[in-house]
Image: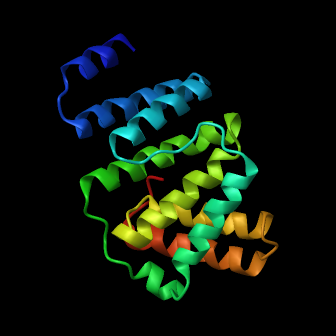
């Protein structure tokens, strides 16, 4: 942690700062310091122009779900897997941070996990697919099963996530 603080004090580039914060998230998560990992991740996301609440309520989750479903209107599964590759370094960094926040959100702020996935899906629609998009798609599929009572659509998003992971080289996720 002292090394990370030293590196953060020396860095001038937000992307470099985010790289250090990604390591801190991993360390905190491995030490079961989930709230600390989440706070660090939200700090990293803010540096990248993405904000999420630490403890969102159910109304926020539902409104984000509606927003995401609206964003996907008119896109077929093949359209989604055919999105161009994400190239913006800030959005790619945001996707990496969002994946890292999945486990601590699951254990410490359950309503944040759907928001993470929904943000990842919307970033993928707007900026193209990244390897991490597969994580967003699979959680989005789970939301279809658990919240929307649409297991067939959930399964389709699971398949879409598998295809995206294969196509984008996301075996590391």
Q: Quadrant of the rendered structure where residue 6 is?
A: top left
Q: How is the image coloured?
A: rainbow
Measured along the vertical axis of the image, is residue 32 above or below residue 64? Answer: above
Across and down, in percent, residue 5 comes to 32, 16
Q: Is residue 53 left or right of 88 when viewed as pictured?
A: right
Which of 57/23 is in front? 57
Measured along the vertical axis of the image, is residue 81 above or below residue 20? Answer: below
Identify the residue shown where x is 27% and y is 22%: 8
Q: Is residue 6 left or right of 133 when viewed as pictured?
A: left
| Residue found at the very far right of the displayed protein | 149
Which of 147/58 is in front? 58
Q: Is residue 80 left or right of 111 when viewed as pictured?
A: left
Across and down, in percent, residue 65 comes to 64, 65
Identify the residue shown where x is 42% and y is 67%: 124
Across and down, in percent, residue 142 comes to 70, 64
Measured along the vertical axis of the image, is residue 46 above or below residue 74? Answer: above
| Residue found at the very far top of the displayed protein | 2
Measured along the vertical axis of the image, is residue 96 above or below residue 68? Answer: above
Identify the residue shown where x is 68% and y is 55%: 61
Across and down, in percent, residue 120 comes to 49, 59
Identify the residue shown where x is 44% and y is 58%: 132
Q: Quadrant of the rendered structure where residue 128 is?
A: bottom left
Q: Is residue 34 left or right of 62 when viewed as pictured?
A: left
Which quadrant would the N terminus be assigned to in this image? Answer: top left
Q: Number of numbered discs present? A: 0
């Amino acid at each position: 942690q002292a090394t990370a603080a030293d590196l953060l004090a020396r860095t001038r580039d937000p992307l470099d700062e985010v790289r250090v914060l990604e390591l801190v998230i991993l360390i905190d998560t491995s030490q079961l310091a989930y709230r600390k990992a989440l706070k660090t991740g939200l700090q990293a996301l803010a540096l990248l122009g993405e904000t999420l609440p630490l403890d969102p309520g159910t109304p926020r989750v539902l409104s984000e779900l509606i927003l995401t479903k609206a964003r996907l209107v008119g896109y077929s599964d093949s359209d989604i897997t055919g999105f161009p590759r994400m190239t913006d370094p800030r959005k790619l960094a945001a996707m990496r941070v969002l994946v890292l926040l999945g486990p601590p959100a699951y254990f410490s702020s359950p309503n944040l996990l759907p928001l993470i996935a929904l943000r990842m899906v919307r970033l993928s629609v707007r900026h193209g697919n990244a390897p991490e998009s597969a994580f967003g798609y699979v959680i989005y599929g789970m939301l279809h099963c658990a919240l929307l009572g649409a297991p067939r659509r959930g399964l389709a998003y699971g398949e879409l996530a598998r295809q995206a992971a294969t196509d984008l080289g996301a075996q590391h996720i």
